[in-house]
Amino acid sequence: MNKDKLNWILTDFDNINRRDWYEILKLRQSIFVLEQFCPYEDLDEKDLTSFHYYAKTDRVWAYLRIIMPDTNDISSIGRIISHADARGKGIGAELISSALKILHQKAPESICRIGAQCYLERFYNKFGFKKIKSLYLEDGIPHYKMDLDWQFFKEKFPTT
């Protein structure tokens, strides 16, 4: 996989390529259900109203969904994954920083809140996410609720 040849795609559910969607679902299942031993219902109504952002060449290498603000003005990014062969190459960080820039353009006043697996806390801190809730279990996996400090993010990841 050549990081420089990645095609970054942002789309809504109604316009996502069917083959890409199949690959995304297969990758989500592979990581969340099989790799993390977490049988849970991955598909939910949020997929229908989210933006889907992913990197691909001949296959999908990384993916997340962007959830626009709800009635409380809380937005999110979620279902963040990268293929095992893409890990450690900076693709995950590029995926998140690019998605947050997109989210900020679309909903600059929203609060961005994520449910982060605890072992990834320091990774998300690099983008400006801070814990707002103590440890809780989601599908048997320890998580933290984290909010993004938009000012920190904009200083560290300026838009050009």
Image (tube, rainbow, N blue to C red):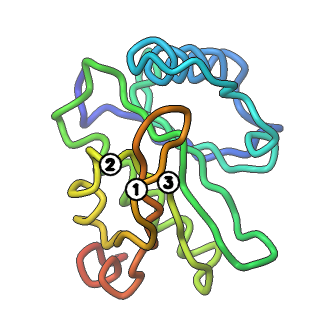
In which quadrant of the rendered view does residue 109 lie? bottom right
Task: Please name the amino acid that badge 3 sits on.
Answer: Gly
Q: Nearer the viewer, mark 3 or mark 1?
A: 1
Using the image, determine if residue 73 lies above or below residue 95. below
Q: Is 107 positioned to the left or the right of 119 in the image?
A: right
Q: Are marks 2 and 1 in contact (CB under 8 Å)?
A: yes
Quadrant where the C terminus is found in the figure: bottom left
- In front of the other: label 2 or label 1? 1
Q: Could you say whether the residue bearing mark 1 is in a helix, strand or loop?
A: loop
In three-dimensional space, the C-alpha distance between marks 2 and 3, rounded to whole angstroms, equals: 9 Å
User: Which residue occupies the foreground of this view, 103 or 138?
Assistant: 138
Q: Residues within 10 Å of mark 2 (few under 14, many from 20)?
A: some
Q: Residue at x 40, y 64 (%)?
A: 134
Instruction: Please name the residue shown 23% across and 77% down the image.
Output: 156
Say whether residue 60 is left or right of residue 17: left
For the point 71% across and 70% down, the residue is: 69
Q: Residue furthest left?
A: 88
Q: Amino acid at mark 1?
A: Leu
**Residue 92 screen position, x and y as percent:** 31, 43
Q: Which residue is mark 3?
A: 115
Mark 2 sits on what residue?
Answer: 118
Q: Earlier in the sequence, mark 2 or mark 1?
A: 2
Q: Is residue 98 left or right of residue 139?
A: left
Number of dots carrying numbers: 3
Q: Circle 1 sits on which residue?
A: 135
Callout 3–callout 1 Cβ contact below 8 Å: no
Q: Nearer the viewer, residue 52 or 35?
A: 35
x%, y% of residue 144?
A: 42, 57
User: How crowded is the residue under tag 1: few (<14 C-alpha within 10 Å), some, or many (20+)?
Assistant: some
